[in-house]
Structures are given as C-alpha cells and as structure tokens.
Image (tube, coloured by chain):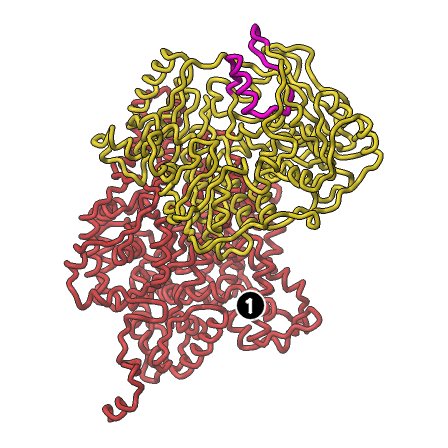
Amino acid sequence: MDSISEQSRNSWIRKDNPKHVSERHKDMYEDILDDRRSSSDLRWSTRTREDVPTYRYNTPRTPVDIKKHVLKSKRVQYVLEKLSQESGKSIAELTTEAAVILDEMGHNINMGAIRGFAFFLVKIFKQLYNHIYVNEDGIQKVRNLLKDYPVLLMPSHRSYMDFLLISFVFFHYDLPPPAIAAAMDFMSMNFFGWLLRNSGAFYIRRTFGDNELYWAVFTEYVQTQISNSDRPVEFFPEGTRSRTAKSYCPKFGMLSAAIEVYFKANVSDIKIIPISISYSRILEEQLYAYELLGVPKPKESTYGLFQARGVLFNDYGSIHVHIGEPISVSNYCEGVIDRSCHNLLPRFIGGLSFDEQNLVSQMSIQVVLNQQRHFVINPWSMIAAVLMQNKDGISVKQLVKEVEWLKRQASNLGAYIDWPGHEPAETVIQESLKIHKNLVTVNSMDIVEMRQAERKGSDSLMDTAAHHLMLASYRNQLMHVFVRVALITLPINACTQDTLSLDDLFEKYTFLEKLLSRDFIFLPGNTRQDFEQALLVLTHTCGVAVQDKAVQIKTSTNKYTVFFSHMFEPFLLGYWVLCQHLLSLPSIAHDKPMAKPAKMITKEAQMVVARLLREQLIKHPETLSLDLLNNGLMALCNINALHKEKRDGAVYMAPNTVVLTKVTESIAQHIEVPTMPMASINVDTKTVVVNAKL
Amino acid sequence: MEQEAPTIPKRRQELLKWNGWGYKDSKFIVNKAGQVEFTGERYRLSKQVLPHLKDFMMKTCGISLEHKITAQPEITAADIPPPIKNKEFISNLRRTGISYSDDCQDRLFRAHGHTLHEVFVLREGKFERIPDLVVWPTCHNDVVKIVELACQYNAMLIPFGGGTSVSGALECPTAEQRMIISVDTSLMNKILWIDDQNLTVCAESGIIGQDLERRLAEKGYCTGHEPDSMEFSSLGGWVATRASGMKKNIYGNIEDLLVHVKFVTPKGVLEKNCQVPRISAGPDIHHLILGSEGTLGIVTEATLKIRPLPQCKKYGSVVFPTFEDGVHCLREVAKQRCAPASIRLMDNEQFQFGHALKPESSSIFASFLDGIKKLYITKLKGFDPEKLCVATLLFEGTKEEVAALEKRVYEIASKFRGLPGGADNGERGYMLTFVIAYIRDLAFEYYIVAESFETSVPWDRVIDLCRNVKHRIHQECKEKGVQWPPYTTCRVTQTYDAGACVYFYFAYNYRGVSNPVQTYEEIEGKARDEILSNGGSISHHHGVGKVRKKWLRNTIGDVGVGALKALKAYIDPKNIFGNRNLLIGNL
C-alpha cells in the first residue's frame, strides 16, 4: 500500500504526510531545541561562535573599561562636583559612593560564564519545553542591524524565563549576548544573580527617585553602552513581569535614558526591536494568581526559583519568540523632534525636551502594541476564554465548536494562532487540556469543568479565585485582540433604543477606552482610528449593521457582540464595585470625602468584592484581583473621578463625587450590576458589615 | 598703481569651461591606455598619468568604463529663454557708456554657480530663467549709476563676481518678471592703493584671488586669504559670502581681514568714515554687508589687511592610527593656540583618495604610502591602513618660527600617537582640494554625482558629527535604492578656539537611479539635518544662498529673520537686489 502510493508520487516530494515531517520548522518559526535533542550540549555550548556581528564604530572595551569610563565621564564628574558643593562631602568621598553604585550595577560579562550558562539552560529548557520557536527572519534582521546601529531589545515580560531566553536565543544564533537591565531584587538570588551578572545582566534599583548620583551613574552606564554599542541592550518596557499575562502599561525611564543618546546625537539612529515571547504555559502561573490576590510575593531567591521549577516534570508546552520589525528611532522622530534644542547646553547637562518626553511615552506604547501584534495565540487561550464564560462546565463537543468559532474571530482580527493544520480541532483541544490538567478536568460525562481548587489557605474563596485568575491569565492573552471591538459591542449590547448613532457610540467608546486604559494598551491620539477600524471589522464580519450613521441595535446584537462584551464584563464590574466603594466612603467636614492611601482603597474594595461574591450577588471571582482594582483606581484618577494628593510621600486619594457618580452610572449602563447593599467596612477587623437586609 | 587686464576675460567662456569647473585646457581624461590623465600645463599635476585613480573610482564608486554618459554639447540659443527687455533701462544705460551684452552665452554663463544641480542642468538640461542682460561696470561710480537706473526703471540686479558660488545664490528666481541684470564686476579689478604704514590694500571688488595675491607679491605682500576657489573667486564675493581662507590661522577669515568696505545699495552707499582697527559704534555695519549674499547691494571696493610675504613656507604631515586620535590632537593644538597657517585632518577615505592621486612617475610626488614606509615602516606597524588618517600641515613665517612651531606641533602630535608623515604627503593633501573640483567633471561622465558641503561645530561634538553624518548618508542611500555604496569622506579643515570646520565630500553612482540630482539633494538635506542635530551649523563659509534657506529660520530664529527682513525693507524696499537668497528677499 505504502509502496504503491510512494511510486505514484511526484519524485520531488519526499515527505507529504505531515505526520512524518518534523516539527522543527513551523511557518516562519524554527525550533532551536530540535538540534539539541540529537547532538552534544557540551560541544554546542563550547563551540566556536562564528561571525558574531559587531557594531562598525565599536571600540572594544572590557567591563572594567566601561566602569572606568563612567566614573570619568563628564556627566558623573559634573554631578560629583555639584553634590560636593551642596553637601560639603569631598569629591573623593562621593567618587567612592559612585564606584559602589557602579559595582552594584555593573555587569561582568565573560564568555566562560555564558557558555556554562548556555549549557545549564539548554538542559532545563529541554526538560520543560517541547519546542522553543524563533522566527529566523527576525534573527537575520537583527544580525544585520547590529553591524550598523545600536540596538535595543524590548521583549514582553511574562516570566523569569524571559531573562534567560533572549540570551539563550542569541547564543544559539551566534549573536552577541545582550546587556540586560534587571531589577535589583534579582541580584540577591545567589547563584542566578551571579550567573546573570556574568552573562551580561546589570542591576538597577527599582526606585531611585531623586538620587542624583545614582541617576548620573545609571544614565552614563546605559548610554555609553549604547553609544559604543558594545552589545545590544535589553530591557523590558513593562518594567516587571506581567502577573496577568496582559501587557502592562509601559514605564518610560529606561527608554528615555537609552534614546537620549539619539536625541543628543551621540549616534545618528537607534533601532528598537520589540520581541514577543509567548508561552503555552507560564511557569509562575500559581505564584502570580496568589500575588494578584494579595498574598505577598516571596523574595526572589534561588530556592524560590527552584521551587517554581519544582514542577520540573510538568509539561510546559512550547515557547514562541517573535523578533519584531525594527523601529528606527530616527524615522519615528522625523518631523516631530528637533534635536538641535540640545545644542545650547553641554550634552552631559540637561534632560529631554517636552516633545521628546512625549515621544518616548508614545514610543514605549507603540513597542508594547507591536509586541502584542506578534504574540502567538495558543489554543488554550481560546479554550480559557470560552470556559470563562461557561464557568459551570461545557461539553467537549460544544467547547470545540465555540473554540473554532472564536479562532475564526481572532484570526479575522489579525491574531496569529498556533494551530496545527493537520490535526482535528478536538485533538488540539484535548492536548491543551492535558497540559493544563491542573486547572481543568473532563468528567465522565465529557463535560469540561474547572478543577476544584485545592485548599491552600484558610479562605476557600481566595483559592477558588486563584484558580479563576490562572484561567483568566490565559484568556487575557487574547484580550488585546478583542479589546477595540469589545469597546464598541459593549454599548451596542447595552443599548435599549432601536438605534445608536455613531457619534454617541464613539463617545461611549472614548469613555470606555479611558476607563480601561490601565488594563489595556491604547496609543494616545489614535482613538478615532482605532474606533473606525474596529467598527469596520464588526460590520464586515460580525453582523453589526450601520445605517444612516447609526447602529441598528436589533440586528447588531448577536453572538459576536455578546461574546466580545462578556469577555470584558469582569473588568467593568470590578471597577463598578470600586466606584461604589469610593462613593460610600464616609465624608469629613463640608461633605468632603476622606482621602485614603491608594493601597488601602484597593484592599477595601477587594473586601467588598469578596463579600458580594460570597452573597453570590456577582459571579466573577477574578474581580478580586488587586491588579484589576488598582488599574481601575488609576484610571479613575486619570479621568478626574479621584484626586490625588501626596502626604509624607504616600499617595492619598479622595473621590470627586460629582464625576465619580457619573462614571459609576456610565459603567452601570454597560453591564448588569447587582443592587448594592449598604455596606461598611471595618479595616481593623477586616470585616464587611452589611447594614441592609439583602 | 599700474593696471593690468584681469586674468579672466570679459567673455569668460573663451577661457573657462562653460559647463564644468575651471580652465578649458585643464581636465581629467581617460587616455588611450585607459588611464586617467590630467591635461594642460597650468598645474603640477598637468600632463601626469594617475594609474591608481581609475581603480580607486571603480572600487569606491563602482564605475565602469563601459558605462559612460556624455553631456549635451551645448545649450543653443533656442534652448535659452529670450531676454526680457526693459527698454528705458537699456537706453539710459547706453548713455552711461557702461559696457553690456545680451548675448545668450554671456547670459548663460552668469546664470549659475557650481552646485551639483546647476552643473547638471548645464550638462543635461536647460535653465528656466537666466539673466536678461550682463553689464560690466569698471568702477564704483558705474555701479552707483547702474543701481540708480535699476531703481528708477524697476529692474532686478544680481551681483556676479567669480561665479564659484556653491549655494545656488546666482540662480535666477523663476518667477521674476522684471528684467534681470547680472552685474559682472570682473572689470573692476584694480588695486587702488597699498598703504605700507598701516599694511592695508584697497582694491576693487572684482579682482580675483590669484591676481590680488600675485600683484601684492610683486610688492612683497600678501593678504594671505586663500579659499580653495582663489583662482576664480573675487574679493566682492568673499565679502558677500563671509569667505574663509585656508591660512586663516595666521591671516584670519574675511571678516578679520576687512578694514573698510564700500557697498552700493538702493538707498545709497553704505560705508564707515574711517579705516580703524576696531570700533565701538553700535552694531557693526560691516556685518550687515558680510554674508549679505547679494540681497542688499553690491560691494565695490574693499580695504584688507596685508602682511609681508613669509620668508619660509613648509608643508608637513602627521599620520594618526585613528581619526579620533587626530581630532584630539587638533583640539590640543587649538587649545595651545599653536596652529600653523593651515592644519587639516583627513579621514581614512580621503587619505585613500590622496593615495590614488599618486602620479605614474614623478620625482616631485613620492608616493604617500611609500614615503611613510621609508621613514616609519617599523613604527607604523600596528597602524591599520583602513583606519589611519593624516593631518596635513602648512607652516609659514621666518625659518626660526617655522622650525620652532614644527617642533611643537610634532611634539603634541606624538602624544596622540601621531607620527610625522613627510612634506610631500602634506603637499599632496592641499593639491587634492584644488584638484577635486576638476575630478567631479570626470566623475560625471561615469554616472557619478558628487558634491561637497561643510559646517562648523564645537569641539566636543566633532567626532560624533563626522561619524553620524557619514553614517546617515550611507543609510539614506540604502533607503533611496542607490545601487552602490556611496563614497563619503570628511576632513576637519579649520580649527578654532571653540570648535572646528568640517568639510564633507559625498559621491555616489547613480546608475539605476532615475532622478540623481533630486536624490542627491534629498540625501544632502538629510545630512544637513543630521549636522544641525549634531550641534553643527548651517554653513561655515559656503553661505546660505537658496539651497540652505530651509534651515535658516531655525538657525537665527524668528526675531533674527524679522530683523533681517526689516533691514531689507529699509535698504531695498523695491527688492532691486531680488535674488531671493537667505530669507530676506521674499517681501
């Protein structure tokens, strides 16, 4: 049988049964673990790295040279002198302080450590993951750019693994090991701290506020490495690992410091490479869930990491590393930035202009959006999204149907979905369920349901919520795809009239965008464009009908609009409870509500949520997430529903009742909300007292 | 003073190329043997074969001898727009006896300077607008009469000196409806007097550099003002563009040399009533004239400082392992204020170019590299031929002064890893700058477009600027689809206390590029953006003209532009000097 079909084949085709083709290449991706499974890791890690690209204007330096340069630099010298005059300390004394900062910060790259590191890593990776896929064309681009430009690598940040991954990929492809900006908390992890430092990581304090000397040393240290482009510089725009698997709003400090080098024309261009790292399963899923609920994060320790890896024999699926399209800083600035504004001051004095600061924040957001564009959506994300809307379980058959439907929608919205073409959908879904068997089970009736949470703490609600949050984190990986269309379907779904004019719709869209702007990423100034694009998708593929500049509500309310809206309901619900809580805050004199620290407000709101969940007045345990509540708080602040004040360095917030009431009403227009019981909270005893009978 | 005829005749096209640089008899050709040769007998390189040049051009720009493009043989009268005639002006002009012409070749010659764009039009296109009349005043009073007539009969005037402008300053605004008169000052070439007590010379503005220096030398003096164009450029042009000379370290730039100037404007003659070394009389009116680029009036006479001819003149050179070392050395020399008459630092690309100009066999020109090898072969080990660069030096003064200065400069150089590279090599560096204008005409024939541009920049940004600008050009060429890597090179060509002047050459092979000049201009525009972003200026000495107008407002600010416009409105309300250079002509 086989031999007959063999004969009849075109002789050019060697293998046409997809089952016989290895999984080494997939679309544009190549599995870099593939070779490692069949040849010596030791030989690989000690091999001669050939043709490693170097920057054409690079002057070779050792880490010690770099430190020397930083201490001698005009910027640091200038600050030393200034501080000496202000504080009366001697220059020598301050220089020692600077040297201490520098030693704490500086990397100490050496090839031996990197090889050891690579050898060690590949063993772990092979154990944990089936494949590590990398888009080769991206690597080729980076290889060429490294010769001509300083390069900034800006990966997404979902896991500790991110730190190791890019270096590993670069080692694999004979690219120079990047200099990675790592937070100081990492440094205290004994072995890893040391290993990372020797593989090119440098450590930055999380906050250094107005410590001028630290700023100067940090800025110079980063900038000299970019100017001379000793190696590509890597940092995470989100600043920290995203515990929710959604993109965090980017931080700007590091990028500002980095591209000041361009603004002040030490270089003529810098290329920024957004990198999207997608995990089938995140190592820290459980840690994150508890963290989001407020269980304090354990101090990063080697032991902790090993513990996180305690589940070494679990299956963590695959990783996709997508090296994004390079962004040229000079092109990005064309016509917007006049760098000659720095001509009137020596370059070691003075910061960025207003326009430049704006551009940096815009650009950070753009980088994150570019990352999002190239996240690889795992089938599990879609399963999670469907399960989140069927919390009581769903039959496998129905699940397959729903997931296939959702897959089509995601793909229409431009998402790249990792879906093996030759497998039946059910197989793909069963595989996923297997990997995530800690979260879901298939019972004897072929019903997929969430696994009962193991009791970990005293509070079973929290344990259940943790489970939900884990599942939510996978659904979250899909949210950026749908957020813009959902902001349109939410008002459509909630509309009680026959038609909704596009102007009104846009107004509501704008409101929702502002409200959700801490939980989701939007490019400032792009609202109209986003709106129009999303509306176009909805009218073209999702049955939304627009006539005479108005949405026809009846025809437009359908499966699509309902599903998309429901995806985002928990967020709005969480915000709404937060608003209710803020409105119920007791007022002090003259009807002025009392100001409270932000952290206290979210914590209290979480208690209200818990209460409502227990009373089964609301049904989304994920609203217990402090991250969600805190994002809500920030967003309310941004739209002036709260005002902020600083007291002794701590941020206090108080509601702006008029605006807040309006916002609360607006939110309630979009989702179903429960009748709110009158509740008061006793913070000391951590109890919520419900005054009215429910 | 006895007078003599100007070196450049009234009918310039009889001596000078009509569509290229310099004398008709002097040009680079590819000879029968397929070697590059320089013709004529005016220059030291004349009649020499340069066996390395062809290979150099092939290697750096990807030229091939098979791909050649020839320029149009001529622009005939049919292709030249007919002159607009202001009859009253002409008839009144005739009465003054001032010589004039509306011959189309005379007019064409004065329609352009030497930017790439202009020369390319000469070679392959035609001008939309050229002067309608050429007049040749012979003295200050002639100019006064011409300006009066122009005001009276509303004609437009464009002053014309040596025609070596590289800023588009001579191009006629295409929208100009009035008769355009090119005021050619070349017959105003007299040295009026020499004052050996105050050491000054007064000359008419049309005298060209080589004539001025030659005739002063006969009396034992010099002005020492030697811009690279000095064979053709005029005294009036220097003043009007704020020219700079190679030996400014000793003699100063034109603004330092200028003691007095007569300037004919529509409002009358602008001048000071004294010839003093310095004055405090409010803002210096000389600085309204210097750099006015023909927008306010015509320079007719100028008094410059002169110096006794130096007893001794000596070339030298220093080789540095890297460009950065060289810049640091020049900075130190400037800091110690011991710069010789000229000190220039060529980057590696320009050093290679110089090497390619080595003649076949010559006792005068020993090979650059050979010379170095002979002297320093051992020491030079470790110098990367792809990285090293060379500073060329010119010392002037008494023998003792020169010897002492030489010692000092070489000592400083040694601190920056610089090694003396011999006199021949220095001399070759200076020759290159004179010769390079001629080479462009040869390059044109092989699909190469080339141009130079310059800037001034503070010391702390020199290295970054040089690197970034060259890099930017390479990247822009890539983006614009230029098929071969461009040739870019720079030199730090002047040093000052607070900064330096940097000079760039940029050439590229335009085979496969449909609009080479426009592409060139776009790329040069990006390069200028990069320069300004790097702390550099709009121009050190070429001026603004028309091609750099778009950067002027940013450079001097709204108030600056407004003040210039107000000045223009007072001095020239009818826009008689309507060449639209700078930003002050657009009233």
Q: Which corner quadrant of the image does residue B162 belong to?
A: top right
| Colour of the chain lettered A | red
In depth, the one of A17 and B97 nearer the eye is B97
In depth, the one of A685 and B571 nearer the eye is B571
B218, above or below A124, in the image: above
Q: Residues within 10 Å of mark 1 (few under 14, many from 20)?
A: few
**In terms of secondary structure, where does tag 1 sit?**
loop
In depth, the one of B451 and B547 nearer the eye is B451
Relative image position of residue A655 (x, y in whole percent): 56, 48
Q: Which residue is mark 1?
A: A672
Q: Is residue B470 left or right of residue B384?
A: right
Quarter of the figure that contains the N terminus of chain B: top right
Relative image position of residue B364 (x, y in whole percent): 35, 29
What segment is highlighted magenta in the picture? B195-224
Q: Is residue A253 visible?
A: no
The chain painted yellow is B
